Structure formats: C-alpha cells, structure tokens
Image (tube, helix red, strand yellow):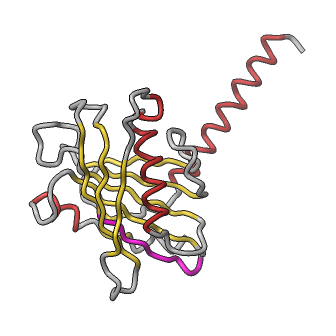
C-alpha cells in the first residue's frame, strides 16, 4: 500500500476515534445543577493527576469570575467525581487524593523547593443521609497570583444504587464559609439525572 494511502487511513481512523470519544463524553449525564457556569469533563485517570486510583469521570463547573483575581468568585468553583468505589471516601482518601489532584493541577509535582499541597478534612453531617465533609486545602496558586492559597472545601457523597457508583461533589473557595459566594456555591445540587444512567 502506498505510504500516502496508509497515512490517510491512519488519519481517518484517529478522527473516528476522536469523534467516538467526544460523543461518549457528550452523552454523560450532568452531575450538578448550576446556572450559567462553564463546564469541563475529565476521564479517570485524570491526565494531570494520574495517581488518583479511581475509574469514572469528573465534571468541573466554573463561574465567570473564577479566574479573575479582583472577582469575589476568584478560585471559587466545583467539581463532581462519578467513580467506581465500594464505600464512601474517608477523610484520609479525600486528603491524599486532593493533595495529588492539586499538586498535579498546579504543577507542584515538578517544583524542587518542596512546596506541596496539604489537605485536611473532618466529617460535617453525621446525621444526614449522605456522607459529608468540610475541609481546607493549603496550596500554591501557580496560575494567577503565584502566592500561597487556602481553599475552603465542602464535600457531599451520594450513592447511586442502580449503577453502584458514588458521586462526590466538591465545592471550593478561598472565601470563608458564610460569605456571599458560598450562597452561590450552596445552590449547586446533584442533578436528578445523575444517578439514572
């Protein structure tokens, strides 16, 4: 077979694979209900945090001001993991895997000065029907300010009986709990369709 023909066939095959992958992502259910926020999807293993040992996908949601330092929404965003695990994540699971997540996201894996992410979580709602946690993540904002940053975090875990998967919703902001941005964050809910696919 002539090399030009072989090259053309390879390109067509790659395009078909890309189209198939895109269509699979587009058919994934929305995990969170948000109004006017941007959206990104990631498949586990996540390319920048491949040490996180789960199978599933992440849906990330961003308000308009999340990347603007002067905005009250700066670094405030949410993501949800729909993953194959047999039990809710523990404090240790959350701490270890969010440290991996932010170290990879912010490129701290490659810094030689030892600066790494530190995460701490405590249970926040033992009396509710889902497992929730409250926490803090101390890291370095390598994207915008180049300064140390502390993110306050709320975590809710929901079990999908039909699919035997957990959906974990993470909400982040450097603003203290109870400030106006958290009113928006608290409006983010689990989508009714999230556990029906």
Q: Is residue 166 magenta?
A: no
The quarter holding residue 149 reads top left
Name which residue lies at 29% across and 57% down.
Answer: 136
Foreground of the two, 126 or 163: 126
The quarter holding residue 140 reads top left
Foreground of the two, 150 or 25: 150
**x, y percentage for residue 75?**
24, 45
Name which residue lies at 55% across and 51% down.
Answer: 52
**x, y percentage for residue 28?**
52, 58
Number of numbered tags placed on the structure image? 0
Name which residue lies at 54% across and 39% down.
Answer: 47
Compared to 164, does 175 lie above or below? above
Figure quadrant of the C terminus: bottom right
Name which residue lies at 28% across and 55% down.
Answer: 172
Name the residue at the front extreme. 114
**x, y percentage for residue 107?**
42, 33
Compared to 20, does 111 lie above or below? above
Figure quadrant of the N terminus: top right
Magenta residues (range): 154-162
Q: Is residue 144 left or right of residue 161?
A: left
Q: Is residue 156 magenta?
A: yes
Q: Is residue 11 left or right of residue 42?
A: right
The overriding secondary structure of the stretch rendered in magenta is strand
**x, y percentage for residue 176?**
14, 58
């Amino acid at each position: 077979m002539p090399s030009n023909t072989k090259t053309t066939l390879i390109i067509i095959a790659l395009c078909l694979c890309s189209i198939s992958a895109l269509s699979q992502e587009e058919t994934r259910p929305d995990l969170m209900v948000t109004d006017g926020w941007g959206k990104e999807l990631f498949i586990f293993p996540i390319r920048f945090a491949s040490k996180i040992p789960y199978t599933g996908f992440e849906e990330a949601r961003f308000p308009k001001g999340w990347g603007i330092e002067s905005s009250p929404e700066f670094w405030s965003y949410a993501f949800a993991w729909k993953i194959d695990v047999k039990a809710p994540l523990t404090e240790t699971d959350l701490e270890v895997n969010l440290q991996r997540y932010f170290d990879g996201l912010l490129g701290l894996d490659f810094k030689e000065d030892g600066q790494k992410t530190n995460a701490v979580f405590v249970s926040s709602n033992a009396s509710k029907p889902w497992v929730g946690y409250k926490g803090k993540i101390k890291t370095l904002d390598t994207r915008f300010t180049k300064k140390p940053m502390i993110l306050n975090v709320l975590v809710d875990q929901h079990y999908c009986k039909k699919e035997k998967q957990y959906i974990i919703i993470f909400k982040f902001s450097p603003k203290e709990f109870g400030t106006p941005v958290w009113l928006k964050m608290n409006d983010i809910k689990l989508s009714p369709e999230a556990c029906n696919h």
